[in-house]
């Protein structure tokens, strides 16, 4: 079974997927003329914009934190070190490239999620399934994505987060993985038996704190080894292009693993962040696109880079030859790639407390990612329902929550290789359907971005009018309720 899972994972994340991820990002960069970079200062301001009055949605800050909860997770620690182990230090450079252009991909998918969001059970819900049906007119594709996303986030993806938490807790505190898994499931139950606003509130409180604390920890380790920083950057850039003597034959692996783990970390193009973006209350869809572009940079250029530099400057990593399977570099001996690399790096500067601090950081990273995974899975189940089915479906949601918690415990005691392959299957199916849809809907994204930019140049606080832009089927935005809500806020 494990070999079958790895085979399917390898098929989904082959060279064509890597090319598609990069092509879509570059395409939207050209199409929007690097819109998210030109308006970067405003994008940061929009993160703190107040809720415009609707009770159905969460604030832009809460949506930002919900998306970051999904982005900043296991991939920022375990994903980074596994990318280095499989692709060499050059994989870090390709993670940066993916994030740089992936911000444009996230701008596109999150803008579309806002345009085609709906009100379900008194809350805003949206995402790729919604825009595939309403914008492309392909309900079958929306159904397919919703199934991939619901199954992926409830069954396939939770294990990678719970596994990373329990193994790091075992390394740092000697807590058996099965006990860690049960405790994690109990804590998760407290959150998911609430609603989207509870998830948003917890994310808003936890995500900023955990991100800053982890970056500070990494900076302490990096500055303690400051003399190694120039050589580390040389190694990253040389390895990225096959120019380093040791890693010269790993160019292909560096690109593949850098992009693969980069997508897994920042989620650009995966179709998960749009679910959180759609929950926001905002006057123009592009605002959430801009906010979510910022979250990609926070995830990869700050948090992932912190992990990468921490393990590289302290030589707390191994690199495996992609052909022979033998270690090219073996600073960690026979220790398999995982959170223990970052824990060893932290312990080298902060003996006795570095490893527990990384374990605590990883706990919060992965815990909030689990919250986001459940919300995303639930959103794609809700896609199939009308409000009239709410009461009838309560038993189903109860079962779904129990299954999700079961997969949390399952992942906590299984091998890291199996849970990562399961995760890659879940994300792979979503990526393929979503990225192709984004290319087909690039015209809608272009119209929305031009409308936003036109209103800003006129000194207005942009308000979205789909009919004026020639955008069809954005039914919620066309309602009298929405028009009245935003009619008096168009001046900055």
Image: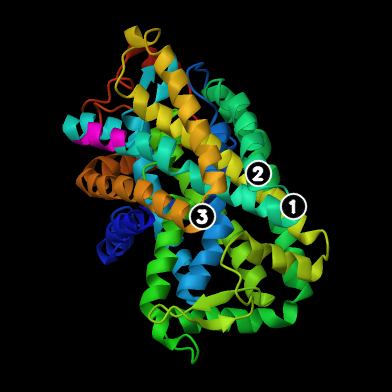
Residue that lies at the very extreme toward the bottom in this rendered image: 245
Residue displayed at 62% across by 59% down: 339
Residue displayed at 28% across by 66% down: 15
Q: Which residue is mark 2?
A: 364
Residue displayed at 79% across by 73% down: 224
- Inspect the magenta stretch and tell me whether residue 144 lies in it: yes
- Inspect the magenta stretch and tell me whether residue 204 lies in it: no
Q: Which residue is mark 1?
A: 174
The mark nearer the N terminus, 1 or 3, is 1
The mark nearer the N terminus, 2 or 1, is 1
Estimate the x, y position of residue 87 in percent, counting from the top left.
45, 73
The mark nearer the N terminus, 3 or 2, is 2
Estimate the x, y position of residue 101 in percent, counting from the top left.
39, 59
Crowding at mark 2 (Cα within 10 Å: few <14, some 14-19, many 20+): many
Estimate the x, y position of residue 229 in percent, counting from the top left.
67, 78
- In the rendered image, is residue 445 in sight? yes
Crowding at mark 1 (Cα within 10 Å: few <14, some 14-19, many 20+): few
Estimate the x, y position of residue 305 in percent, counting from the top left.
59, 64
Vertical placement of residue 486 versus 188, above or below: above
Residue at mark 3 to residue at mark 2: CA–CA distance: 21 Å
Q: Which residues are magenta?
A: 141-147
Does dot 1 land on a helix, a strand or a loop?
loop
Crowding at mark 3 (Cα within 10 Å: few <14, some 14-19, many 20+): some
Q: Which residue is mark 3?
A: 415
Mark closer to the observer (3, 2):
3
Vertical placement of residue 317 versus 7, above or below: below
Image quadrant in which you'd find residue 288: top left
User: Foreground residue, 94 or 261?
Assistant: 261
In the displayed structure image, the side of residue 262 where residue 222 appears, left or right:
right
In the displayed structure image, the side of residue 365 where residue 145 appears, left or right:
left
Magenta stretch prevailing secondary structure: helix
In the displayed structure image, the side of residue 350 where residue 448 appears, left or right:
left
């Amino acid at each position: 079974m494990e070999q079958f899972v790895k085979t399917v994972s390898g098929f989904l994340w082959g060279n064509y997927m890597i090319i598609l991820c990069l092509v879509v990002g570059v395409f939207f960069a050209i199409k929007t003329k690097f819109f998210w970079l030109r308006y970067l200062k405003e994008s940061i301001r929009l993160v703190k914009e107040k809720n415009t009055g609707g009770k159905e949605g969460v604030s832009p800050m809460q949506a930002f934190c919900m998306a970051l909860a999904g982005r900043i997770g296991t991939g920022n620690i375990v994903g980074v070190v596994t990318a280095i182990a499989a692709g060499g230090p050059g994989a870090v450079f390709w993670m940066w490239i993916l994030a740089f252009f992936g911000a444009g991909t996230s701008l596109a998918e999150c803008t579309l999620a806002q345009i085609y969001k709906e009100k379900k059970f008194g809350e805003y819900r949206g995402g790729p399934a919604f825009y595939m049906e309403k914008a492309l007119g392909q309900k079958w594709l929306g159904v397919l994505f919703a199934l991939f996303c619901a199954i992926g986030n409830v069954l396939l993806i939770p294990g990678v987060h719970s596994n990373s938490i329990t193994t790091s807790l075992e390394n740092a505190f000697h807590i058996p993985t099965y006990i860690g898994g049960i405790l994690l499931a109990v804590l998760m139950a407290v959150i998911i038996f609430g609603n989207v606003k509870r998830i948003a509130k917890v994310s808003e409180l936890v995500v900023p704190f955990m991100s800053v604390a982890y970056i500070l920890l990494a900076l302490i380790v990096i500055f303690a080894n400051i003399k190694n920083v120039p050589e580390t950057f040389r190694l990253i850039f040389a390895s990225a292009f096959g120019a380093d003597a040791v890693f010269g034959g790993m160019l292909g692996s560096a690109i593949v693993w850098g992009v693969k783990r980069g997508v897994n970390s920042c989620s650009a193009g995966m179709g998960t962040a749009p679910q959180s973006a759609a929950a926001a209350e905002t006057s123009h869809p592009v605002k959430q696109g801009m906010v979510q572009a910022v979250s990609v940079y926070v995830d990869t250029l700050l948090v992932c880079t912190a992990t990468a530099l921490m393990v590289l400057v302290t030589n707390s990593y191994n690199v495996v030859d992609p052909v022979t399977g033998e270690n090219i570099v073996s600073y960690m001996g026979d220790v398999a790639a995982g959170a223990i690399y970052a824990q060893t790096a932290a312990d080298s500067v902060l003996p006795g407390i570095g490893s527990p601090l990384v374990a605590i950081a990883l706990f919060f990273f992965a815990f909030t990612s689990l919250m986001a995974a459940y919300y995303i899975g639930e959103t794609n189940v809700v896609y199939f329902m009308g409000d009239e089915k709410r009461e009838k479906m309560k038993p189903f949601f109860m079962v779904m929550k129990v299954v999700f918690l079961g997969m949390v415990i399952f992942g906590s005691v299984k091998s890291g290789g199996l849970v990562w392959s399961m995760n890659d299957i879940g994300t792979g199916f979503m990526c393929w359907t979503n990225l192709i849809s984004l290319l087909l809907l690039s015209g809608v994204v272009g119209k929305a971005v031009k409308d936003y930019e036109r209103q800003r140049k006129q000194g207005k606080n942009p308000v979205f009018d789909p009919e004026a832009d020639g955008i069809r089927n954005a039914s919620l935005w066309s309602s009298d309720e929405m028009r009245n809500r935003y009619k008096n806020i168009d001046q900055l």
